[in-house]
Amino acid sequence: MGSYVRLVVTLTAIAAAASFGLSAVYNATHAKTEEYKRLETENARMEVLPTEGGELFEETVTDSLVDGRQFTYYTAYTNDARDAVCGYTFTAYGKGYSSTIETIVGVVPDGSISGVKIVGQKETPGLGAKVQEVASKNTLWAVIAGRGVDESGATPWFQDQYKFLRSADLHVVKTPGEDGILAITGATISSDAVTESVRDGLDMLTSIVEIGEPSEDGRWVPPGSALEAGAPSGEASNASAPESATPESKEAEAGGGDE
């Protein structure tokens, strides 16, 4: 009986010490983790918009819900005076195969997507996780022979597909060459999750903000601003209009299977 009591006491002490240790580690790292995520999100906002630095991001929390979450978006102004708008950003949340996929979306004021960046996902490695994959064009032999191409600036092919698209263009396809978002082979659920969440968020954003056209000099002018009223161009900062381009070629073959 005495040995049984000692065993129970020993196990209880070990469990208590382990719990205390885990709690201490969490408390010591939680603040740093949250700060890292905040900085990552801020950097992503600037990456998905055609910004040049010095922009002001203003948060707007709405009463509207998208997939059960309160919809929040940021308006990017060229300066603190809020004379011209660079665009808008919001976070889309899509239910993937094994996780919620978080995507930062940039939208220029004509309602088209300027870029997306997936900042959070725990999908199946080799399948759904390819939503963040940067596809390399280098072969093993090319690298060994020293003929490899510098790909330090490469971006995820799946995310690049969203550039310049509007809401009506956001649907998943399984055949290369079709108009739409080419699905990742074996990860249709993850592909659908990102695409549908981006489309739902874009539809909500464009129902709230007034979509406009650039002025003759290429500046995006928010309704009611001094520029719209005819103020001289020197009284406000210029905002660069996005250049017209075609999306990059689809780099992966599509498949009909799900994760």
Image: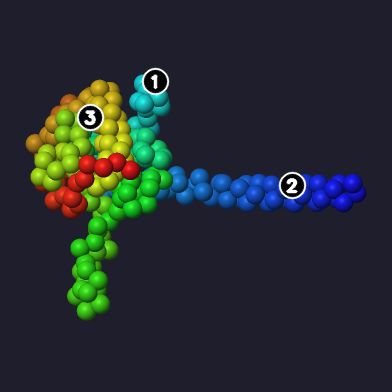
Residue on which the image places disc 3: 222
Q: Tell me the residue at 37%/39% (across/down).
A: 97
Question: What's the mark number on residue 16?
Answer: 2
- Residues under labels 2 and 3: Cα distance? 58 Å
- Quarter of the image where one finds residue 153: bottom left
Q: What amino acid type is highlighted by mark number 1?
A: Asp
Identify the residue shown where x is 62% and y is 47%.
27
Q: Give x and y (percent) for residue 75.
A: 31, 34
**Which residue corresponds to the image point at 35% horizontal and 25% vertical from the top-left?**
66
Kind of residue at badge 2: Ala
Q: Secondary structure at mark 2?
A: helix
First in sequence, mark 2 or 1: give its number. Answer: 2
User: Foreground mark, 2 or 1?
Assistant: 2
Q: Where is residue 213 shown, x and y percent of the image?
A: 13, 31
- What amino acid is at disc 3? Pro
Query: In terms of depth relative to the viewer, which is nearer, 207 or 13?
Result: 13
Query: Rounded to the nearest whole Å, what is the CA distance between mark 2 and mark 1?
Result: 44 Å
- Sequence-wise, the earlier of marks 2 and 3 is 2
Residue 174 lies, with reference to residue 230, above or below; the image says below
Question: Does residue 82 appear in the picture of this structure?
Answer: no
> Which image quadrant: the C terminus?
top left
| Residue 33 visible in the picture | yes
Q: Label 1's element?
A: strand
The residue that disc 1 covers is 63
Does residue 237 appear to the left or right of 247 in the view shown?
right
Q: Position of residue 171 (x, y in %)?
A: 20, 34
- The reply to whether dot 2 and dot 1 touch (C-beta < 8 Å) is no
* Residue at the farthest right position: 2
